Image (spheres, rainbow, N blue to C red):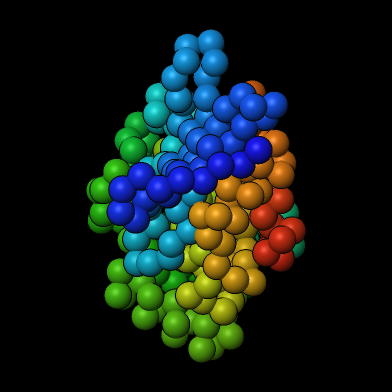
Amino acid sequence: MLAAFFSGVNRMQILIKDNNKPIAVLYWGSTAVRKYNHHHDKLGRFASADGSSGDYIEEQGLRNKHGSNSVKWDVVKSKEYTKKFLAITDNEYVATQIAKFARKALLNRDGTETEEMYALDINNGRLITKVTDQNEIRRVGRTDRFKKLLNIAESNNTNILIIHNHPDSSVPSLADINALLDNERAAGITVGHNGNVYYYTKPESQIKAMDFSIAFMKTKAYNIVDESMRREEVLGYLSKKFKFRFEKL
C-alpha cells in the first residue's frame, strides 16, 4: 500500500507499506529517501531523490554517512583499473588519458569529502576544461568557463566525457545524470575512492523525484541488503525507462 501526505510547505512524504508494515519513507523538498530498520525502530538513510539540474551537482543524499574516503591506491593504480575504460572507448590512448585524470581527481581529493571535475574529448583524450578549485562538501559546480568551453567543444562536434570523483564511491546521483541534459554530446563517469567506476549517458528527459520513488518500489530495492546494490538496481530500472546507459565498469 502506498500512502502520501504533506508535512510542511514544499515537503512531501510517501510512506511505503508491505502487508501493512512500513518499509520505507521517501521525502522530497529535502529529497531524502529513508529505509526502516525494524531491529532498531529508526530510519537509516538510503538515497537522494533530488531530480533537479543546475549549476551545482549536489549529492549529499546519495552519500554514505560513515566510512573512510581514503583512496584504495592498490586498486586505482592497477592495470585492471585502466582497462575498465576500454568499455567506453576502443582507443587505448584515450582509455589511458581517462584513467590519468580519474587518478588525478582521486589524488587531489584523497581522504576528503570534496570533489573535482574534468571534461575530456573522448575522441583523442584531450583535456577540454576542469573545475579543481572548489571545496564544498559532496558537490562540484559547473563554472561559467566550464560551460562555455563545453559549448564550444560541442559546436565543433566533439564528444565529451565528464569525470568527477565520489568520495564514498556511490553511483551517479540524479543531479549528475540530469546535468547531461544541458549538453548534446556529453556522457559522464563517477570515480569512487574505492575503485568503483560508473558510466552514464544523457536521459531522454529529466528524471524527477517521483520517478526515483516509483523505481525504488517497483524494483523492491528496499529488500536488498547492500546499499550500493540497491542504488545500482534503481538506476538500472531508470536507465531503461529514460533510455540512457548506466553501467558499472
Image point (72%, 41%), residue name: 219
Q: Depth check: give the residue in front, 209 or 123.
A: 209
- The percent position of residue 30, horizontal first and vertical second, equals 36, 47
Whether residue 218 sits left or right of residue 158 in the image: it is right
- The percent position of residue 188, horizontal first and vertical second, equals 55, 60
Q: Quadrant of residue 248?
A: top right
- The percent position of residue 91, horizontal first and vertical second, equals 70, 63
Relative to 124, say whether 16 is above or below: above
Q: Depth check: give the residue in front, 16 or 164.
A: 16
Image point (53%, 88%), residue name: 156
Whether residue 37 sits left or right of residue 63 in the image: it is right
Q: Quadrant of residue 204?
A: bottom right
Image point (54%, 16%), residue name: 38
Whether residue 178 sits left or right of residue 112 in the image: it is right
Q: Is residue 202 among what the camera can see?
A: yes
- Give the residue at the far top of this rendering: 39
Image point (53%, 72%), residue name: 181
Relative to 190, say whether 69 is above or below: above
Quadrant position of the N terminus in the picture:
top right
- The percent position of residue 120, horizontal first and vertical second, equals 51, 67
Relative to 168, say whether 12 is above or below: below
